[in-house]
Amino acid sequence: MSYILPTNEISYAAQAQLRMQAQDQGMARAVQMRVASSTSGLAVRDPDYPIDFVPAATRAGLSGWLTMPLAAAGNLYSVFADNVPAALTPQVPNNAVWVFYKATILTVGDPVSELYFLIGQAGNRKAQFNLEILQDKLEVDGYFSEPIVYDPQDIVTVQVRARVINPAARVVLGAFIIEPLQVSVV
């Protein structure tokens, strides 16, 4: 069962434990999927949004996380977008595992109500989170009770349900990219 824990309702120690749990599960999965033969052969890093999630052809000038414009209340929109803006469904490289552990809503006015993690373009549901419980908090972000792990070659579809129309909404995901040591992204 997955649910979101508002950041300001859990201790710093609990936040660190949830990040470590995400890292450990991702590394174990990477070894299981033969990304590396052992955890000592793996690097864990924060994602570089344009490099990791956006195709090279459409990332020019993109310097941070971009969510699709919320054009109609009640509809689903991708948290991955490029400069066009076009909705993206990034694919995990064949030598990596992606782990998502947190969501932050950077837009004032609480524009989204639900967060969905799906696998594939058609969208088999991996997890779903009610974001409305964050709306009266000092910090509009929260940790997932369980990390969401994507395997090599998985197509990652992550969507939010628009609560209101907002052309500039931004929902940022806390994540780890787990890959073999010495993989360069530049």
Image (spheres, helix red, strand yellow):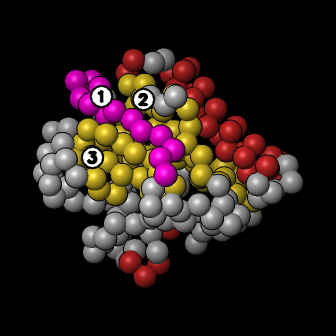
Q: Measure how far apart labels 1 and 2 are at the Cα level.
A: 9 Å
Quadrant containing the C terminus is bottom right
| Residue 81 spot, x, y in % from top left | 34, 64
Specify whether residue 63 is in view: no
User: Dot 3 lies on which element?
Assistant: strand
Which residue is at a point 66% across and 60% down the rendered structure image?
152
Classify residue 100 as left or right of residue 61.
right
Quarter of the figure with residue 94: bottom right
Residue depicted at 39% across the width and 17% down the height: 9
Question: Of the residues shown, which amino acid type is indicated by label 1?
Answer: Leu
- Determine which of the numbered discs, if any, sits on residue 134 in the image: 1
Query: Which residue is most to the bottom?
Result: 57
- Closer to us: 138 or 129: 129
The boundaries of the magenta stretch are: 124-138
Q: How many residues crowd mark 2 within 10 Å: few (<14), some (14–19), many (20+)? A: many
The mark found on residue 117 in the picture is none
Mark nearer the N terminus (1 vs 2): 2
Q: What's the amino acid at mark 3? A: Arg
Instruction: State which tag comes first along the sequence, 3 or 1.
Output: 1
Q: Are marks 1 and 2 in contact (CB under 8 Å)?
A: yes
* Amino acid type at image mark 2: Ile
Question: What is the crowding at mark 1: few (fewer than 14 residues within 10 Å), some, or many (at least 20)?
Answer: many
In terms of image quadrants, where is residue 153?
Answer: bottom right
168 shown above or below 113: below
Front position in the image: 183 or 135 = 135
> Residue 171: where, in percent of width, then height?
33, 48
The numbered dot on residue 161 is 3
